[in-house]
Amino acid sequence: MPSKPASTPRLWALRTLVSSGQARLLSGLTLVVLLGAWCVLSYLTVDRGHGPESLVPTYFLPAPDAVVKGLVLLFVQEDLLGHAGMSIWRVTQALGLTLAVSLPLGIAMGSFDAVNRLLDPVFAPLRYLPITAFIPLLILWFGIDESEKIAFLFLGTFVYLVPLVVDAVRTVPEELVQTAFTLGATRAQVIRTVLVPSALPQIFDGFRNMNAIAWTYIILAELVNTEKGLGAMLEAAKRVNKPHLTFAGVIVVGIIGLLSDVLIRGLNRLLFRWREADV
């Protein structure tokens, strides 16, 4: 009688979710290792013939305590909350505009192949063009004020969200569509009651990715004629050659982006509880 294969520990089982406790432990371990490596590289000193100095120069990697002091300085002296609020407002406007345009366009392209064939030659190459190449054109078209920054963030997310919406609509099972037609639904009713509700969870996942992309572009968007915003704050830190302030600003951008991602995930679970239950 063949022996029963030994069971694989859940931590190393293929395509098996680890427990919540294990997930927290692994995430915490990663943070501890990274912080420990940062401390070693920053505080460990060597003598290169000019006296003891940090293993890694401070202009390349500021020490953790210097970055913490930088965060305090940004909050007290540089109006960190005001800069962060302006960046959040710009990202929110751009993502709202992206949703307003991408949803109807992507749904139409995903529902009707003729519309997709008509517009895909425009969207296909746009996804491969560097967004920074459009900055001179956007300045020419919209000037150097707020409209240019919103347009830049919109363009950087719009060209990626539309294909995701198209794919989400196309992956709706054909059986659902044919069943709706059998029950007497019109094309408009099928789109409204079958395609869109079934595709929304996947579209929401795509929107979460667009939020991440927008926060990676916000610094570039705020480099042109900007007095308020995290990008302007980081540019000012670079001009005065204070890398600890730059590191502090980058950490702030990462924290805000992470918090917004947590918010979107929470909204996702709230809106699509049935999918969470299936998972």
Image (tube, rainbow, N blue to C red):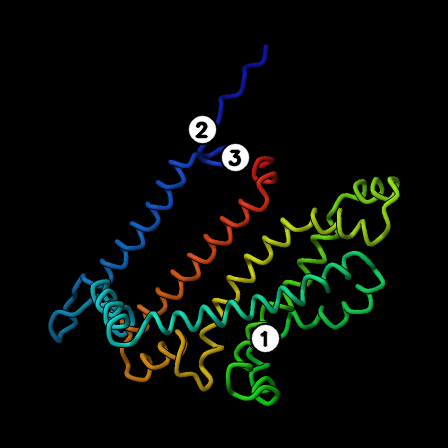
How far across and how far down the image is residue 132, in percent?
Answer: 55, 78
Q: Residue at x 32, y 84 (%)?
A: 239
Q: Is residue 200 above or below residue 69?
A: above
- Element at badge 2? loop
How far across and how far down the image is residue 85, in percent?
Answer: 40, 70
Judging by the rendered image, the residue that carries numbered circle 1 is 130
Closer to the eye: label 2 or 1: 1
Determine contact: label 3, label 2, CB under 8 Å. Answer: no
Q: Residue at x 81, y 45 (%)?
A: 177
Determine contact: label 3, label 1, CB under 8 Å. Answer: no
Earlier along the polypeptide chain: callout 3 or callout 2?
A: 2
Residue flagged by tag 3: what amino acid is it?
Answer: Thr
Q: Is residue 229 left or right of residue 276?
A: left
Q: In the drawing, what numbered circle is on residue 16?
A: 3
Residue 252 position by quadrant:
bottom left
Q: Which residue is nearer to you in this view: 240 or 230?
A: 230
Q: Is residue 272 above or below residue 81?
A: above
Task: Specify the farthest residue to the left.
Answer: 51
Earlier along the polypeptide chain: callout 2 or callout 1?
A: 2
How far across and how far down the image is residue 30, in percent?
Answer: 35, 49
Judging by the rendered image, the residue that carries numbered circle 2 is 9
